[in-house]
Amino acid sequence: MTDTDTRISGANTAPRDSRGRFGPGNPGKRRGARNKATVAALGLLDKGSKQLMQKAVDLALAGDSTALRLCIERIAPPSRERALAIDLPVPKTAADVPDTLRAILRAAAQGDITSGEAERLSRTVETFARAHELADFDARLRALEAGNAQ
């Protein structure tokens, strides 16, 4: 074994397969490790965070539009999704699912919700239906097994 071989397969490196390739992931860093420059920058910001926030607020109050936008975004961050104010029948059984889907379609057609919102709601109802079917199947199977055991 040469010096190069020792360095490549030394104790400080990640294991390799029979063809000499590294396994999945980054063999040089552990998961969640941060860059040293990032850690140093965060440390500096942490020390002066109160003064920095006060300066941003002062600039915003003085009319600096960028500072104002930054302060507003921290106070009230933009919402990723809006709350939907539509009346939907909540299905209690799989037989109720078509009524709920009809209400979702109606709300989308009337413009009360977007097509993307309708799709996400429909997927939620579909998940409910599958869960209900699975629970029903499980109950029937247990009843059959209990009947066969007697």
Image: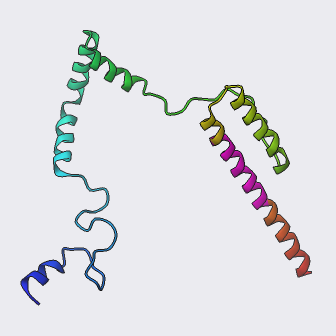
User: Residue 100, image x and y in percent?
Assistant: 78, 39
In the picture, the quarter occupied by the N terminus is bottom left
Q: Using residue 42 as the reference point, say whether residue 85 is left or right of it.
A: right
Q: Nearer the viewer, residue 21 or 84?
A: 21
In the picture, the quarter occupied by the C terminus is bottom right
Q: Name which residue lies at 28% across and 65% down.
A: 26
Q: Using residue 118 as the reference point, say whether residue 101 is left or right of it.
A: right
Q: Can residue 88 be seen in the rendering of this structure?
A: no
User: Residue 34, image x and y in percent?
Assistant: 24, 52
User: Residue 141, image x and y in percent?
Assistant: 83, 70
Q: How is the image coloured?
A: rainbow
Q: Which residues are magenta?
A: 120-135
Figure quadrant of residue 13: bottom left
Q: Residue furthest top?
A: 62
Is 118 included in the stretch rendered in magenta?
no
User: Residue 43, image x and y in percent?
Assistant: 19, 41
Figure quadrant of residue 120: top right
Q: Residue furthest left?
A: 3
Q: Nearer the viewer, residue 149 or 138?
A: 138
Q: Residue furthest front?
A: 109
Relative to 136, residue 118 above or below: above
Q: Name which residue lies at 17% across and 51% down.
A: 36
Relative to 135, residue 106 above or below: above
Magenta segment's dominant SS is helix
Q: Name which residue lies at 37% across and 26% down.
A: 74
Q: Nearer the viewer, residue 66 or 111?
A: 111
Q: Name which residue lies at 38% across and 25% down.
A: 73
